[in-house]
Image: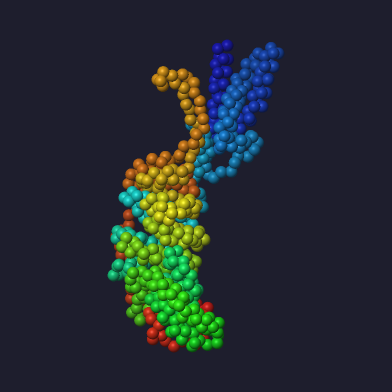
Amino acid sequence: MFYELAALGVAGISGVVLAWFMRRGSTLSIRNLYMPATIGLGATLCFLASGRIALAAILAPLCAVTVAAALAGRRWRLHDLGAGEELRQHELSRRWLWQPPPVRQAGERVYIASQGELVHRRPWTPKVPRIAMGAGEEEGFSLPLGQGQHVFLAGATGSGKTTTARRLLATRTLQEQAALLVLDQRGDEHDVEQLRRLAAAAEVPFVLIDPLAPNSDRYQPLWGAPAQVAARAVEPIKASEPYYYDMLRLHLDVVCRLLYAGDLWPPSVPLLVEAAHPAQYPALLQIAEQLDGRHATLKRRARQHEAWVGSSKGREALDGGASRLEVALALATREIVTPRVTTDGEAVAVGLAQAMTQRAVVMWRLHADVMPDEAAAMSVLVLADLHDAAAHAGVPWTLLLDEFGAVIQTAATRATAILQRGRTHGGQVVVATQSVIDAEALTQQVGLLASLTDNFSAVVAHRQIAPESRDWLAKLMGTRALWQSTNQTSGHGAQHSGQGSSRRVREFRIGSDVFAELEQGEAVIYTTHGPDPKRGRIEPTELLAAQPQRIGGAKDECELLVHPLDTLEGRPALRPGRVVGEIDPDG
């Protein structure tokens, strides 16, 4: 008798273990055991009632397994159904034995952990390449690479934010051979050296646009059709001076078409600034009068525009607009936007589309601390230029927007457009800022941060001190549902009565305080392509000291031809047969 009871006990324990495994690690419903348990129990009772003790003794242990599993499993099933939310849905989605299992990726798991937490372990999305940011190849501590995989990077000064950006940019440049564009608001000399090394390692040209550097390359943002140039040139004053923008936009459209028809295309920035001044319109009108009959529409428009330019209202609007245009385009020094003369006597300057085609590393040092207005204008102009150049170049590219809070303050619309452009034209944008709330704090646009976040595939959070930043990051990383137990006490809390309750609560996957505790080089990475957010240490990328290719001498592949004149005086005779709308490939 003892052995029979022991066998029943072992069978019952085995049934409970079976139910536990079915609930925790499988998608099978415990209801699959209800019918076998009922049939087995009924058969055992029938054998006992008919006096066939031997058969009942054999069947009883087998029946005990299914009965114990069904009873324990039913209790847990009701418990999960009462929990609500994802645990209830998980229980309702369980399958019968004859139904096929759910389709999942290799390595994907869904199981119930302690305290009733429903865990969904997802492997990295196979179609998206990644870069491991730590010392190993751990999927949970990686960042995505490729078109549209934008990354938001936040970290206080000295937290390791620069190390993270360099590792990501180096991988994208060396592994995927993407052009690299860096918009640096502060102009750290150490960053310049690192980009030099990266360009040398990738064996691509290095372009430096720096208004305060004697060896700066020359930049030509005016290229393409006359209408494109007119729109791009006034972009820096669009947000701050809407009245002057409207007036100057109409005026520049006429000016650019006349410059093109007059064989002064593409114009340098100094030439366009001078031509946009109302005092120079008579010289433009002379160009219009020299055009042949195929330009009849342009000639008529130029004459009609003359009346408005000569009016007091028109002159007042254009005087103010031309002054703002000069501030926006001259960028505190005419040097970087004035073409250089090659050894062959050609006037050339770096074209962004040409530089991207060569997979060049291009850096703009804006010196926002000493030239805030010029840095803001340059940021808008570069983003407008990149928006057009990305479609023209047709190559993969990476853009680093450093001090993103300052950029978004002056170029919110254009920055958002660049994020969208990258999704369709091979771009990956990395935005870096000290605090995650900079975007809303500087623009005073409530909800801007949330709308921007929808454009990012990954968020890297280094140390954050501000409570608002930490709380926002904690909410972004998500929550998990758990059972929380409470115990009844007596004696002023000194004794437990043995009674209590439990309720379903949600807690953050990464607590708010964690972001304030991160050490230098540590970060929390959250992506939409892989496992849950994870804390880890960023592995630095070391590049050998080397000098990259720089522009000089004859015309470089990164440069385009620019009209050599910087004034309307001494313009050459018109070339016959030129019709507005015909754009040279280099232009």
In this view of the protein, which residue sits in the foreground, 63 or 421? 421
Q: How is the image coloured?
A: rainbow
Task: In the rendered view, tell whether residue 428 sits above or below residue 106.
Answer: below
- Mark yes or no: residue 200 visible: no
Q: Quadrant of residue 99?
A: top right
View extreme (front): residue: 312
Task: Indicate whether 423 appears above or below 61.
Answer: below
Residue 535, percent across and down?
Answer: 40, 43
Residue found 46% across the figure and 45% down from its top = 476
Foreground residue among 449 and 159: 449
Above or below, 314 against 402 in this view is: below
Q: Position of residue 38 (x, y in %)?
A: 66, 23
Seen at 41% across and 21% down, the residue is: 493
Left or right: 22, with 379 as reference point? right
Which quadrant would residue 181 be assigned to in this image?
Answer: bottom left
Question: How many numbered marks appear?
Answer: 0
**Image position, residue 43 (x, y; %):** 68, 20
The residue under the point 49% across, 88% down is 290
Instruction: Name the residue located 41 percent from the left edge and 45 percent from the top edge.
Output: 468
- Up the image or down, 228 lies above or below 522; here it is below
| Residue 49 visible here | yes
Residue 4: give x, y in percent of width and height. 58, 15
Q: Quadrant of residue 6?
A: top right
Q: Nearer the viewer, residue 190 or 249?
A: 249
Residue reaching furthest right?
50
Quadrant showing the N terminus: top right
